[in-house]
């Protein structure tokens, strides 16, 4: 059996830890062409949706290949935040007056951001952003404008907006761990809107990582 079931009783182990081991096992075997892409995604769906220890273990019961050091190092680089503020700015101001302003791609996230929006729009896409600080504060002053924030799963978002005939919608649940980046959005919105949503799910990130690792293994 791929997952070690000796020692602590399986049901007494943290479900998140068991799930992570199962997902690592799936990625490792998929990257070495032991299971097909279809089988990998099907089992990955089951692994991310199940809270049953025994169901999780059965997903990799027929897979003997275990993650090696190369896999662990690549996973660490891809999923563990590395906060280094040496090259990051502490504060950034974005102004959108009768215009639009946006950040997307691999941009460096400062510790604090100030958004001034008047009859304009600001789009902040944190999907591929590089976090240099664990806590990021965004202060918003929005009059008759719109602010659109996109984040990946694993980034915690807290909204403390004061709305005057405006709206704030937060569809990005805080599901990141203790070391995950946290974005705190505060300020005032008058006749404006603030929308926060997830752009890339954890499953999408895992599939992308699996394909990257598979390609790296193929080129060796």
Image: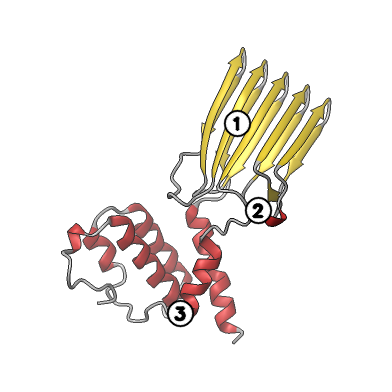
Image depth: mark 3 or mark 2 in front: 2
Residue that extends furthest to the bottom in the rendered view of this protein: 220
The answer to whether mark 2 and mark 1 are in CB contact below 8 A is no
Secondary structure category for the residue under label 3? helix
How many numbered discs sit on the rendered protein?
A: 3
Q: Residue at x 73, y 34 (%)?
A: 122
Q: Earlier in the sequence, mark 3 or mark 2?
A: 3
Point out which mark residue 69 bears. 3
Q: In screen coordinates, is 170 left or right of 11?
A: right
Q: Is residue 170 above or below residue 27?
A: above
Q: Name the image quarter holding residue 55.
A: bottom left
Q: Residue at x 62, y 28 (%)?
A: 194
User: Marks 1/3: CA distance?
Assistant: 41 Å
Image depth: mark 2 or mark 1 in front: 2
Q: Earlier in the sequence, mark 1 or mark 3?
A: 3
Q: Earlier in the sequence, mark 2 or mark 1?
A: 2
Q: Is residue 122 above or below residue 16?
A: above
Q: Name the image quarter holding residue 87.
A: bottom right
Q: Is residue 169 above or below residue 111?
A: above
Point out which mark residue 195 bears. 1
Q: In screen coordinates, is 54 left or right of 197?
A: left
User: Marks 3/2: CA distance?
Assistant: 28 Å
Q: How is the image coloured?
A: secondary structure
Residue tagged by mark 2? 85
Please state the horizontal and vertical placement of residue 91, each as a whole percent of the image. Answer: 72, 40
User: Marks 2/1: CA distance?
Assistant: 28 Å
Secondary structure category for the residue under label 2? helix
Q: Name the image quarter holding residue 56.
A: bottom left
Please state the horizontal and vertical placement of residue 23, each as a whole percent of the image. Answer: 39, 65
Please state the horizontal and vertical placement of residue 214, each as a whole percent of the image. Answer: 54, 76
């Amino acid at each position: 059996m791929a997952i070690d079931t000796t020692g602590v009783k399986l049901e007494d182990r943290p479900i998140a830890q068991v799930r992570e081991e199962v997902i690592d096992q799936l990625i490792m075997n998929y990257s070495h062409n032991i299971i097909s892409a279809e089988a990998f995604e099907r089992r990955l769906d089951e692994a991310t949706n199940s809270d049953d220890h025994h169901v999780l273990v059965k997903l990799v019961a027929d897979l003997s290949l275990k993650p090696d050091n190369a896999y662990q190092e690549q996973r660490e680089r891809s999923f563990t935040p590395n906060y280094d503020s040496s090259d990051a700015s502490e504060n950034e101001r974005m102004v959108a007056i009768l215009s639009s302003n946006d950040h997307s791609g691999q941009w460096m996230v400062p510790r604090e951001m100030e958004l001034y929006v008047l009859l304009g729009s600001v789009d902040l896409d944190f999907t591929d952003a590089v976090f240099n600080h664990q806590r990021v504060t965004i202060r918003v002053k929005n009059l008759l404008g719109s602010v659109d924030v996109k984040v990946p799963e694993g980034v915690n978002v807290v909204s403390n907006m004061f709305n005057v005939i405006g709206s704030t919608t937060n569809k990005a649940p805080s599901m990141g761990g203790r070391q995950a980046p946290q974005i705190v959005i505060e300020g005032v919105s008058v006749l404006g809107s603030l929308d926060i949503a997830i752009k890339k799910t954890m499953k999408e990130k895992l599939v992308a990582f699996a394909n990257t690792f598979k390609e790296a293994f193929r080129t060796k």
